[in-house]
Amino acid sequence: MSRAWQVVALAFVMSGCGYALAGKGGSLPDYIKRIGVPPFQNLSATPELDRLITEAVVAEFQKRGNYTVVAETTGVDAVLTGALQSVTPIATAFTTGQQASKYNVTVVARAEFKETRDNKVTFSDTIRVTDEYDVVGGVAGGDLATVFTQDRNALSRLAKAFATSLVQTILEKF
């Protein structure tokens, strides 16, 4: 058998091996086309993060599939609701004057994804996302407002990381 035929035969055999992870479909069922994502509730002390997370979740669903995502909870095939529970900074590096120069900021939110045709909850869990932020000049006492003021994109990055994690987790359930 020539070398070319061996390569073709090997490619054919490998393509038919059927290797896949069960439950890792990466997309929602075909009957879910329209998803309701009302604004996340904000139970944290960080203003605007709920709005940014909601916008990021909508964008992430739209990026990952051919879904129409709306703020309404009626006339949709599924609804994703969420509540931002906390935003917690933990200082991980300090200046010589003992002011925080780097933080790990953890966002914790509760989310539920429900199919409306049979009122079936397919995902309900707490999502935690942590991101790291440098602080110019140091910050005393875990002042998140200063951290987020110094880095205008920090909240957006945190919201995007959260949305990516949440949507990926939901899609992997199918």
Image: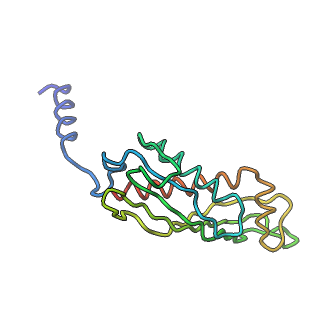
User: Relative to the observer, which residue lies in front, 17 or 30?
Assistant: 30
Residue occupying the point 49% across, 65% down: 111
Horizontal side of residue 38 vs 49, given as left or right = left
Q: Residue 137 sits in which quadrant?
A: bottom right
- Work out whether 26 lies above or below 41: above
* Residue 31 on image: x %, y %: 31, 47
Which image quarter holds the C terminus?
A: bottom left
Residue at 36% across / 58% down in the picture? 115
Q: Residue at x 73, y 70 (%)?
A: 91
Q: Is residue 90 above or below residue 9?
A: below
Residue 39 as seen in the image, left or right of residue 121: right
In the image, farthest residue toward the front = 74
> Picture coordinates of residue 67 (x, y %)?
43, 43
Residue 30, image x and y in percent? 30, 45
Q: Residue at x 44, y 53 (%)?
A: 74
Q: Quadrant of residue 3?
A: top left
Apparent side of residue 168 relative to residue 49 in the rendered image (left or right): left
Residue, far right: 97
Tell me residue 66's x, y (percent). 41, 39
